[in-house]
Image (spheres, rainbow, N blue to C red):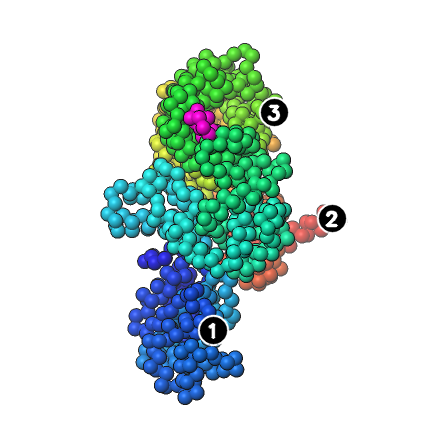
Amino acid sequence: MQLTVLRGRDDECRAVRSLLDGMTNAGGALLLRGEPGSGRTALVGYAHRHAEGRTVLAGSGLAEEAALPYAGLQRLVDPVLDRATALPTEQRQLLRRALAGESCPADRQLTLSMAVLGLLAAAAQQRPLLATMDDIDRGDPQTAQVLAFVARRLRHLPLAVLLTADLTANLDGIPAHRLRALTEHESSAVLTDRLRQLTEREGVDRLPERPAASALAALTTIGGGNPQALADLAEVLSAGQWRGEEPLPAAPPADGALGRAYRARLDRLPPETRRVLLLAALDEDGAPGTLIRAVAAAGAEVEALAPAEVAGLVRVEQRGVTFPQPLVRTMIAASAPLAERRAAHRLLAEVLVAPGQRLRRAMHLAAATAGADPALAAELEQAAVGGSDGWPAASVALRWAAELSDHPRLTAARLLTAARYAWAGGQSDAARLLLDRLRAVCADPVMRARADLLRGELELRCGSASSASVTLLASAAAVHGTDRALALAGLVRAGEAVCFAGDQYRYAEVGRRALALRCPDDPPAMELMGSLIAGVVATLRGDHERAGPALRRAVVLGGRLTGSALTPTALSCAAAAGLLVAVDGAAHRLAERAVELARVRGELSMLSRALELRAVAEYWLGRHEAAAETSRDGLRAARATGQVNCANVHLGMLAVLAAIRVDRATSLRRIREIGEAPTPGSRPHALAAWALAVLDLVDGRHAEAADRLASLARLGTGRGQVLVQVMATPYLVEAAAHLAHRPAATAALAAFDRWASSTASPLRRALSARCHALLAPRGGAEAERDFQAALRLHPTEAGTFERARTELLFGQELRRSRRPRDARTHLHQAREMFSLLGVECWAEQATTELRAAGESIGPPDLPAARLLTGQQLRIAELVAEGATNREIAARMFLSTRTVDHHLRNVFHRLGIRSRTELARAFTAERHVGLASDR
């Protein structure tokens, strides 16, 4: 594969340039090892392009000449064979006889090898020489032996040898690089490069300028990080496939360059080995018993795989047959003739007779079947129910079933089920393409509406939330007469969509439609969804007296779900209700259960949403580190399943949590990752604004912080992110407290008060009291009374950070009211709590306030073991013993830079400024410890 830009091969390119640059002083050699298509030939071409001012000899190993001794060597040195006159007579004659096809006796091999070395040295006398041999392992072994000998003896010659070989090749004594698989980013770059080249080469206007993100993600997986596989795929894609509008091929093309390379390797194997190898490739489960039985049914033995194992295509172990390179299995199957593939599938189906092998048996039969087969289609459908073999496998089975169906309505129903299974397994692009196929074959309005409900959910998680709400509302209306439960689930998703987009005023319509669907005898899952919608409608209207009972009922029902009603979706609905009614512990338990269930069942489409709810619950519980870890987990899950909207919510939450810890770099990085895709007014946009406002507040830009937070929602209009603004209200009020004009903060606090007073949450009420204290006249009794009330209300078991913030703000108020003695008590409490939490910026702010209150600050009155992490404590102890940073780094296997970083944090947390003070502090602490022991 020849590309000007070699993606993912920077290390190898540097090694090639280093080899070339070193030729003026001394020679050298380099061996590049990699699987077929990994870019070995491209790197040889790279070396040729950068060999200006050097003589270049180029050769390649040919399988057709592998039985001809020294054939590869003859082609390589032929251009300089006239220099053989400089060789000693014996060497010259032996070299000419070997290159003429005469054999070289074993006892003359050293002489021949020295002759080749001398010939190349003579050719390099006038200017340096580069000799390259691509695929040295494919040609005759005698050439490989001689060139390896030469490559080890170039130290004092202006000569370089570059060799490439398969991963199984082993040439000792030669510096080697193993070509790794490309990363997802590098693979995407290769595909983008190829598309640009195709457009320029063919002048095809129909091709898009850039591939669709969904197509890139799928193609990088299919390509397995192999550059040639990606290039071959690019050559056969249609414009619709580049745009993500048509199904993609399941494998690189069998007639592409990579397919031909693998076919050539397979052709060199015995026929029986190829048959067994095909069975192993098609048996993706890899259970040893299955393959052994299938091989026996074919009249062969597993031992027939030995030549394939020697060739590096497979590993045969006690636990089964494995394929070392990701693409080998795919290319073996793709390269086999159709008739052989079908015969192998039938053999595997015959031996899969155990109850747990029903789906795999049916899928092998489907792969061996041509044309419609209603009975097999029904078997596939039944075997896939419940996704016990994994949702992706179940989706593939239903796709087969749809193709084998003999009635359009059955085809459409099975395509819809396949799309549901694909989405459950987190395959959003596959689900979308299946829905497109369904639309093309189905005219039934109800079936199309069911499909649009799924399409709307996909759009909610992966596309435009505003479009999703329209689709979901229309589809729910179309199915409400035939399936109330499905219609109600669609309305729940529509409600999520309008809230995500910041169009809460449209939630009233969701509520009206849901109310019309409810019945007194609804099952628990339906009652839960109806209660959630009713509670959200009332909450957004500010009617918390009606909202509270409905939301609490949803929480109770969520805790009672059993059987088929117990799903990650239902539990997530109950968790969302718990957050709205401020029962954070219950919400966390429900979200945690939803996460566990989604993982156990493999329902990856719901995992990110469940983690989002768990992160919010952890935020309210004051577990900020846990919330950040949950959001990072949710971000990974969202990105793995193509859920860009969920990913942006997690990024926004991570930005907020980093801003609260005053980790400015991380917060801004997360905001940059969100990018400009989210619509203004959407939840990710609001979370990013909240994070920026917190950073403004920390930097004293109070007006900017207040403006950002006030813009999150327009109270009274139902537009914007009302619920995010409620969460951020304490920060809005804190910023506004420094301003003369505060109408937005006053209005937001009124909304927060109504909500907080309707809950049983001490934390919400404590925050409400703190906000009122901040807006009260400075230095007055009202402010002090509200601060005292906030401290009484703060829960002791959770929300330590918020209590510390209240202590800090109260201390600031008292100090500025000229009551430094009273202020110091609260500021000490704040500094201690912030230090324990590891929030150093806030601890420093408390320290600054204490100094302003007239206190000379030393280390907090806490043992170092409580203030420092384990690693910080060990470093501090070694410093106290007199060890230098370099000695500490050596003893703890750290870099000196890491030790220095930890030591700065130790100084800050202990409030000291030198190593001498640190040693004194630890000496005093040990004396205290000994005294207490006595």
**SS assignment at label 1:** helix
Q: Nearer the viewer, mark 2 or mark 1?
A: 1
Residue at disc 3, secondary structure: helix
Direction right: furthest residue: 934
Quarter of image, res 665: top left
Q: Looking at the magenta stretch, what is its main secondary structure?
A: helix
Residue 593 in view of the camera: yes
Eye-nearest disc, 2 or 3? 3
Percent x, y of residue 636: 48, 41
Q: Give amino acid for label 3.
A: Gly
Residue visible at 37% across and 75% down in the picture? 77
The answer to which quarter of the image holds residue 655 is top left
Apparent side of residue 863 relative to residue 234 in the rendered image (left or right): right
Q: Is residue 312 visible?
A: no
Q: Position of residue 842 (x, y in %)?
A: 49, 41
Boundaries of the magenta span: 405-420
Mark 2 or mark 1: whose residue is earlier in sequence: 1
Within-10-Å neighbours for mark 3: few <14, some 14–19, many 20+: few
Q: Which residue is mark 2?
A: 933
814 horizontally vs 508: left or right: right
Give SS at disc 2: helix
Residue to which mark 3 is pinned: 563
Q: Is residue 253 magenta?
A: no
**Closer to the camera: disc 3 or disc 1?**
1
x and y percentages locating residue 802 in the rendered image? 52, 33
